[in-house]
Amino acid sequence: MAETADRTSEKKSALQLHEAIQNGECSAVEVLDETFARIERDDAKIGGFLSLTKDLAYETAKAVDAKVKAGETLPLLAGVPIAVKDNINVSGYPTTCASKILEGYVSPYDATVTEKLRAHLMPIVGKTNLDEFAMGSSTENSAIQPTRNPWDLDRVPGGSSGGSAAVVSQGETLLSLGSDTGGSVRQPASLCGLVGMKPTYGLVSRYGLVAFGSSLDQISPFGRNVADTAGLLQVIAGFDRNDSTSITAKDTDYLAAVQKMAGKTLAGFKVGVISELNGQGMQAEVSEAFQNAVQTLRSLGAEVSEVAIPSISAAVAAYYIVATAEASSNLARFDGVRYGLRVERDDIYSTYCKTRGEGFGPEVKRRIMLGTFALSSGYYDAYYGKAQKARKLLAREFADAFAKVDVLICPTAPTTAFKIGEKANDPVSMYLSDISTIPVNLVGIPAISIPCGFDRQKLPIGLQILGRHCEEFRLLQVAQAFETASGLFNLTPSLN
Ligand code: GLN
């Protein structure tokens, strides 16, 4: 085992690992053996995985090795192990959403993204921890276990996709999938020193993702560098008739777009700093790292200016109306009859109440109540109607901004990773940690978070780049140029 460990772990990127498997330098089964050995060694302290899908993973890895032996060309990223957030269905395996209410539930079908991972022969190794039903920013709302940040085990990995972020940061896998409704992939990417990208709304099918806020949710990739993340996005993107909000994008060869940037500057790229999110009022080191990132982009030849999006001040409030309203409706299906937990009582109404009372955790209940209230007659116009108006206004301001610049930038999160428990009893301060990421979901545009520095405690800081609808390639190109210039990629926590 020691020898195989050396052989595959020196392949730092997912794309290199894939190439090594294709060339027969190592087998997919060997890579998987090593992956599970790492998970066994490290995950007890990280708590990233809720369950493993070993049979499925080995079945896929064997199929990869058979193809290599037969001299066939493998699909993109074949053989590279991947972790999947536990609100995405993998047929025949549990989906818990880190909630007690789904105890015992086994998914009868694959999400579209799962089918795509299978078609690309990427071994799915397990399901990762999250804030219950993806509601949170720290993964502390998981009803099952906490997840720890590999950069400092006393700190949160961010959330809600904290499990998917932590396992990639720790190097248990090189890639993972999360879901991003208001920042749940970009914020943990920032706190764990990774790349995380929320695609344009509709670019990746939501079929088989347990719905939270349907008009905001997007399945999103995590990677340790821009090219790996671009490759994974390419695997999962595409029109799907099972998702009525699915779109057809023209250029989805994201990898080619990134590779085109080799040796190139950003001359001709117009970058706008969002005035309302220019680092002021944020942790001093975050602000400092952001100003340095702006300098780096300038030195790469980008033309940088400031652009105002005034309605950003209303974004968090609008989000917590829209997201909770949609969640209250989406979560009505968990009633003790159709899925998972059932707490039997004499009559059906009491069974519903008892099941939901015992099955949902406090944050989920808070959101169902908020959302139900916001949608109730008499209050609908005052809250939901108003939130939708704020959303429209925000969309208009972003459109105006993108008429002037190609991409916008801001820090991904106002702080670096906070201590476990630090914000647990202060939901509003937790909600505010998504100030930079939430506007993106409200208007459906793509955005990526990439590492841009460290604070004094050696905790990673993220830079967010936002783009026009379906211009993922442009975001990725700016991100790639920045990554090359900064040298901040494939970061390994110093604890390891
Ligand atoms: N932290 C935000 C929330 O709690 C976003 C969550 C998400 O993107 N799933 O709703």
Image (cartoon, rainbow, N blue to C red):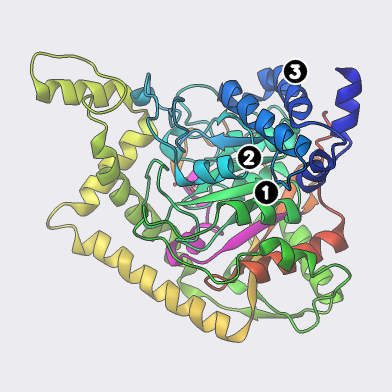
Residue 299 is drawn in which quadrant?
A: bottom right
130 or 473, which is in the foreground?
A: 473
For badge 1, the amino acid type reads Pro
Locate residue 457, reporting x and y percent: 80, 40
Where residue 148 sits: x, y (%)?
A: 65, 29
Q: What element carries label 3?
A: helix
Label 1 Cα crowd, 10 Å radius (few <14 / some 14-19 / many 20+):
some
Tell me if residue 483 can be seen: yes
Nearer to us: label 3 or label 1:
1
Q: Is residue 279 visible?
A: no
Tell me the residue at 85%/61% (across/down).
484
Span of residues in magenta: 430-451
Label annotation for residue 41: 3
The residue lying at 76 percent from left, 38 percent from top is: 68
Query: Which residue lies at the image location 39% right of the left edge and 24% below the top edge?
Result: 106
Residue bearing mark 2 = 121
Q: Position of residue 28 (x, y in %)?
A: 75, 32
* Residue 1 rendering spot, x and y as whole percentages: 85, 17
